[in-house]
Amino acid sequence: EKSYKFEEFLPIHETIMNTLEQGTFADYMEAFKTFDREGQGYISGAELRHLLSSLGERLTDDQVDEIIRNTDLQEDLEGNVKYEEFIKKVMAGPYPD
């Protein structure tokens, strides 16, 4: 699991919080790119779960599970997911209650 220093985390958190207010595809892509240190278009599945349950409007584990089920999220052999596909599927809905 990756850990961030507070100085690294603060701009990331601000990016995500601003993204949640605006909510465009480009905004979400920019926020996820912050976590994509290699610039390959992937984020670890574990990190995605952590982000969904701890930043912005914090989701419960059940809500995160439902989003992942609804988006048919598939991890690669290294446990990574392509976040562009994830964002497109989430923005298309359906949304959990």
Image: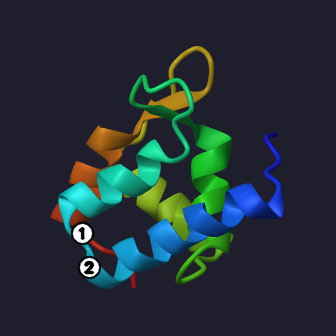
| Viewer-proximal residue among 52 and 23 | 23
- Residue at the far top: name it: 77
Q: Quadrant of the N terminus?
A: top right
Q: Which residue is disc 1 drawn over?
A: 94
Q: Is residue 11 left or right of residue 50?
A: left
Measuring 57% from the left and 61% from the top, which residue is drawn there? 12
| Helix, strand or loop for disc 1 | loop
Q: Is residue 6 left or right of residue 73?
A: right
Local packing at callout 2 (Cα closer than 10 Å; few below 14, some 14-19, many 20+) is few
Q: Quadrant of residue 91?
A: bottom left
Q: Position of residue 51 (x, y in %)?
A: 61, 61
Q: Distance from label 2 to label 1 (Cα)?
A: 19 Å
Q: Marks 2 and 1: which is nearer the front?
A: 2
Q: Which residue is disc 2 drawn over?
A: 22
Q: Is residue 22 left or right of residue 61?
A: left
Local packing at callout 1 (Cα closer than 10 Å; few below 14, some 14-19, many 20+) is few
